[in-house]
Image (cartoon, helix red, strand yellow):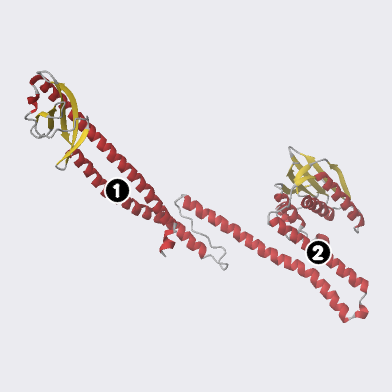
Amino acid sequence: MGRRRFRSLRARTTLGAVVVVLAALLVGAAAFVVVLRLVLLDGVRTSAESGLDQAAARVEADGAGAVRGYEDVLVQVVDDDGSVIAHGDDADPPALPTADESRWSHDGERWLLVADDVDLPGGGDATLVYGVSLEQTDAAVGAAVVLLAVGVPALVLVMGLVTWGVTGRSLRPVERMRNEVEGIRAARPDARVEVPDSGDEIARLAGTMNAMLDRLDRAAEGQRRFVSDASHELRSPIATIRQHAEVAAAHPERTEVAELADVVRSEALRLQDLVAALLELSRLDEGGTGRRRPVDLDDLAFDAVARARVRARSAPGGVVEVDGSGIGPARVLGNERVLAGVVRNLVDNAVRHAETRVVVALADDGGRAVLTVDDDGPGVPPGERDRVFERFVRLDEARSRDAGGAGLGLAIVRDAVRAHGGEVAVTESPLGGARFVVRLALGG
């Protein structure tokens, strides 16, 4: 449990803050002590040098005996042989160190010594040593060290407690949201996280989480609908094949083999097209269009037009004219197989709905390839122009499944175009029917 608590964001934040502040305070405390000692020592040195100058003036004027009577400081006059000529009341022999700014300890007390050469009145010279006690300096530095040793841990402790409390209070809404999200089950897919009115990052996180839940809910609903529609579409050809097979088995004398073979072949092709469309949608859902390379979109358009003309001539009820004279050169970067499916689905859809004429055009418009497919059929009502690209949507329900397809062609077109960074839309055609427009960036 302790290890788990340590791994919490609250514990890591508090620990990090404590470590950083403690390190900063330790460095600051050490620097403060060093600076304080230097400042105090500089004051003591200034005082010692001032006292040395005064004592030197008296010695040079009155002789070495002038240093007698100095109290609370150390004063000695030392000759070249190291013998003490004269000294103050607190500086009994032996001789003090004569090096300037020396440290000297006596009876547990530290002193700062300064020295200078002096000329004695009767002739000759000597060294004057003057010392000032460092007791007050050491006491001040020691008191500062004690205060810092007590104050720094106390300050770090208070800061850690405040950080722990503030972090816990800040993370409380996050923990509440976590519990709310954990409580969302399939039985309550519409449940959402409560958004606080603070207007801060937590509120924005709650809003983002609700938006994510909305997307997941829509995706789950779309998946359920997709599975249901796919099951229904797959069931139909399977049921037809099974029905004819059972009739043939029960009444072989009334069944023509050629007729049964035609039914099975027709439904198998329909089933094959449906499965291929479902697989294509699955690949597009995974965001993959395969390896991209330069593709001549005009070649794909000419192939689709030629294929549609053959199908139109073989279709019952007359001939639909497929005009490809408006196809100009355009090269894009993409997957040739997927883009060929886009063009083919749009042209086949137009031929299926046209009365007499389909016009396919391709042009370069400001660095984008624009493919338009027009027909003179019934068109698409304005309120259905977004829905027509959804999966398993057939606007003319009276149309037979054989003629109208499974409702996946335009869904494949939309997903494939989006996967290539383009866009597709349907508007009203100058021919009176529908115009499908695909825009893709030129490349290659």
Q: Earlier in the sequence, mark 1 or mark 2?
A: 1
Query: Residue 195: x and y, percent?
Result: 48, 56
Q: Nearer the viewer, residue 184 or 289?
A: 289
Residue pictured at 50% horizontal, 51% vertical? 204
304 or 43, which lies in front? Answer: 43
Mark 2: which amino acid? Answer: Gln
Report x, y in % for residue 207: 52, 54
Residue pictured at 11% horizontal, 18% vertical: 123
Q: Position of residue 292 (x, y in %)?
A: 74, 48
- In the image shown, does 337 or 328 lie closer to the viewer? 337
Residue at the limit of the structure toward the front, as seen here? 81
Give the numbered dot on residue 152.
1
The CA span between labels 1 and 2 is 78 Å
Q: Residue furthest bottom?
A: 250
Q: Residues within 10 Å of mark 1 (few under 14, many from 20)?
A: some
Rendered view: 234 above or below 145: below
Q: Can the viewer see residue 161 in this picture? A: yes
Residue type at mark 1? Val
Single out the mark in the foreground, 1 or 2: 1
| Left/right of residue 55 with respect to residue 192 in the rendered view | left
Task: State which quadrant residue 315 falls in.
Answer: bottom right
**Any part of residue 397 in sight:** no
Give the number of callouts.
2
- Secondary structure of the residue carrying tag 1 is helix
**Secondary structure state at the residue bearing disc 2:** helix
- Crowd rating for badge 2 (residues with CA inside 10 Å; few <14, some 14–19, many 20+): few
- The residue that label 2 is drawn on is 272
Q: Estimate the x, y position of residue 79 in percent, counting from the top left.
A: 14, 26
Point out the image quarter for the C terminus. top right
Mark number displayed over residue 161: none
Relative side of 191 to 106, left or right: right
